[in-house]
C-alpha cells in the first residue's frame, strides 16, 4: 500500500509533467529544520533515484526556506559548481508544502569514512583543489539574482553571535576575548558574495573521483566569502586529522590553488587565520545553542547534552589560533 | 564523608566499563554510536570527580595572580569574562593570554584529553 507521502509526491510530479510511480521511499537522517527522503521514481521512460527535501514546519532562524534553497542550487549549477539538479519546487502553501525534489547524487557524506576508507584515497588527493574551485564558483554567482536569501554582513553576524552567547548566561572568557579581538579586525577587503555557510565534510557528496556535489544549502546567505574559506579550515572539521588543515584531508596551498584557478581574489594566510578564529567561535556558539536546546527542555537529547562539553574544544583551538600561531 | 565504597568515581567507572564491554557490541550501529556517546559522557564525569578539586584550586591561583587583587571573592571565571569585556584586562596583556591558555588546558583535560590541540599544547 502506497502511503500518503508517496501519493502526494506522485501527484506533484504529475503536475510537473512527470507521470510515474514512487517506490522505496526511505527517510534519511536530516537536520533539525528539514526532512530528507530518498525514493525511486519509475516512469515509462526511465527509472530515477530522487531526493525530497521538505521543511519540518518549524521556522529556524538559521535556515532559509526549502524553496529558496532550491532556487539557490539552480543558480549555482549554472556557475559550474557541482550541485544536484533540481527536479521540481513546491511552494509553502500547496502540494508538498515548503519542499523540493532533486536528483540523488551517489556518494559518501560521512566525514570519517571519507577520511579513512581506502576507496577514497584517490579522491582525497584531489579534494582540496576541487573544494577551492567549487567555492570560487559559488562565490562568483551574481548576488542580485536572489530576493529571499538573507544578507548577513559580518559585523551584524558577529553581534548576533555575541548576543546569542550572552543569552545563555554562561561566561566564557576565551569567547569574550575572541569577540573583542574580532571586533578589532578589518573585514572591508572583500565584496559581498553568495556564501554557502556550512561548507565542510558532512555537507559534501564525495565519490571515488572526488567532489560530486555540494549539498545542505540551508545556511546560505549573502555576505563575506571568507566565511566559507575559514570554515573549511578550522580544526573542528578535521575530524582528528588535524595536520591536514583543509577538512582533515588537504593542504591550504592546494585549496587556494583551486580557488585562484577560478577567482582573481588574492587570499593570504594571515587573513585566513582571522576567519579561522571567527569560524571556530561560530561553531562554539552553535554548540551552545544545541546544548541549551537540551538544558532549556526544548529537546531531551544525549547528543545535545554531550556537545556542551565540546565547547572547550573550540576554546583550546581559539587560544591556539590567537596566541600560539595556530594551524 | 559518610558514604561507603564504591566511591562515586568507582561507580561511574564500573557503569562505563559495563556499557563498553557488555552492551555496545550487542547493539545495532546507530545505538552502538549513541552508547559510545554515553560512555564518553561517563568518562568526563569520572575525570571531573578525580581532578575537580585540584584543577579548581590551580585555576583560582592563576586568577588571583592575574587580578593582583587581594579580594579573593573575585577570583572566578565570571569576573575574568567581565574584565575582558570591560577592557580592565587588555587584549595585549601577556599574563591574561597565558591565564586563558592554562585554564582552557585544565578544562579540556577533563572534557576531552584526546583532542588534537590539547596534545599539541601539552607536548
Image: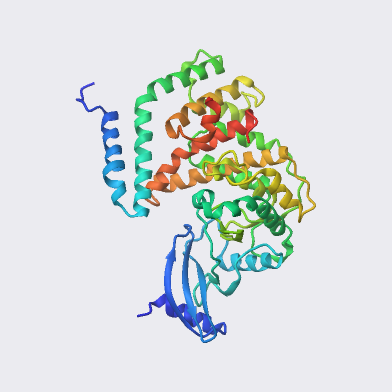
Q: Is residue A173 above or below residue A238?
A: above
Q: Which residue appears at 49% of the width and 49% of the height?
A: A112
State the image quarter where residue A142 is shown. Answer: bottom right
Residue A177 visible in the current orientation: no
| In front of the other: A129 or B72 | A129
- Quadrant (top left/top right/bottom left/bottom right) for the N terminus of chain A: bottom left
- Quadrant (top left/top right/bottom left/bottom right) for the C terminus of chain A: top right
Residue B24 pos. (x, y %): 31, 47
Q: Is residue A206 above or below residue A185?
A: below
| In front of the other: A52 or A220 | A52
Colour mapping used in the image: rainbow
Residue A250 pos. (x, y %): 63, 46
Count up the numbered dots.
0
State the image quarter where residue A184 is shown. Answer: top right
Q: Residue at the far top: name it.
A: B70
Q: Is residue A129 left or right of residue B25?
A: right
Q: Residue at the far right: name it.
A: A264
Residue B10 pos. (x, y %): 27, 29
Q: Which residue appears at 49% of the width and 35% of the height?
A: B115
Residue A98 pos. (x, y %): 52, 70
Q: Is residue A112 left or right of residue B38?
A: right
Q: Which residue appears at 58% of the width and 69% of the height?
A: A67
Residue B99 visible in the current orientation: yes
State the image quarter where residue B37 is shown. Answer: top left
Amino acid at each position: 500500500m502506497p502511503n500518503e507521502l508517496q501519493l502526494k509526491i506522485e501527484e506533484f510530479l504529475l503536475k510537473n509533467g512527470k507521470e510515474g510511480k514512487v517506490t522505496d521511499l526511505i527517510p534519511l537522517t536530516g537536520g533539525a529544520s528539514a526532512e530528507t527522503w530518498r525514493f525511486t521514481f519509475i516512469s515509462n521512460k526511465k527509472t530515477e533515484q530522487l531526493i525530497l527535501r521538505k521543511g519540518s514546519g518549524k521556522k529556524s532562524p538559521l535556515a532559509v526556506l526549502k524553496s529558496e534553497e532550491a532556487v539557490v542550487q539552480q543558480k549555482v549549477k549554472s556557475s559550474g559548481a557541482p550541485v544536484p539538479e533540481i527536479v521540481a519546487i513546491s511552494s509553502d502553501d500547496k502540494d508538498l508544502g515548503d519542499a523540493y525534489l532533486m536528483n540523488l547524487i551517489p556518494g559518501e557524506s560521512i566525514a570519517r569514512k571519507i577520511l579513512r576508507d581506502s576507496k577514497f584515497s584517490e579522491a582525497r588527493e584531489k579534494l582540496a583543489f576541487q573544494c577551492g574551485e567549487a567555492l570560487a564558483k559559488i562565490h562568483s554567482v551574481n548576488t542580485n539574482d536572489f530576493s529571499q536569501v538573507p544578507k548577513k554582513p559580518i559585523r551584524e553576524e558577529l553581534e548576533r553571535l555575541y548576543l546569542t552567547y550572552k543569552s545563555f548566561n554562561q561566561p566564557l572568557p576565551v569567547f569574550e576575548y575572541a569577540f573583542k579581538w574580532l571586533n578589532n579586525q578589518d573585514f572591508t577587503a572583500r565584496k559581498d558574495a553568495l556564501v554557502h555557510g556550512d561548507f565542510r565534510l558532512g555537507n559534501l557528496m564525495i565519490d571515488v573521483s572526488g567532489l560530486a556535489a555540494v549539498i545542505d544549502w540551508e545556511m546560505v546567505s549573502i555576505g563575506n566569502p571568507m566565511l566559507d574559506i575559514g570554515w573549511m579550515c578550522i580544526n573542528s572539521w578535521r575530524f582528528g586529522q588535524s595536520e591536514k588543515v583543509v577538512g582533515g584531508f588537504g593542504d591550504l596551498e592546494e585549496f587556494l590553488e583551486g580557488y585562484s584557478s577560478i577567482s582573481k581574489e588574492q587570499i593570504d594566510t594571515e587573513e585566513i587565520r582571522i576567519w579561522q578564529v571567527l569560524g571556530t567561535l561560530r561553531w562554539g556558539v552553535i554548540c551552545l545553542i544545541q546544548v541549551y536546546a537540551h538544558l532549556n527542555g526544548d529537546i531531551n537529547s544525549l547528543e545535545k547534552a554531550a556537545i556542551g562539553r565540546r565547547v572547550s574544544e573550540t576554546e583550546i583551538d581559539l587560544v591556539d589560533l590567537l596566541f600560539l600561531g595556530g594551524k | 564523608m559518610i558514604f561507603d565504597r564504591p566511591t562515586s568515581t568507582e561507580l561511574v567507572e564500573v557503569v562505563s566499563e559495563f556499557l563498553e564491554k557488555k552492551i555496545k557490541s550487542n547493539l545495532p550501529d546507530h545505538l552502538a554510536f549513541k552508547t559510545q556517546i554515553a560512555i564518553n559522557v561517563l568518562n568526563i564525569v569520572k575525570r571531573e570527580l578525580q581532578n575537580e578539586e585540584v584543577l579548581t584550586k590551580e585555576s583560582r591561583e592563576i586568577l588571583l595572580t592575574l587580578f593582583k587583587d587581594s579580594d579573593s571573592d573575585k577570583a572566578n571565571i565570571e569576573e575574568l569574562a567581565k574584565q575582558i569585556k570591560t577592557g580592565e584586562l587588555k587584549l595585549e596583556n601577556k599574563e591574561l593570554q597565558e591565564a586563558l591558555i592554562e585554564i582552557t588546558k585544565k578544562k579540556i583535560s577533563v572534557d576531552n584529553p584526546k583532542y588534537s590541540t590539547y596534545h599539541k599544547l601539552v607536548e
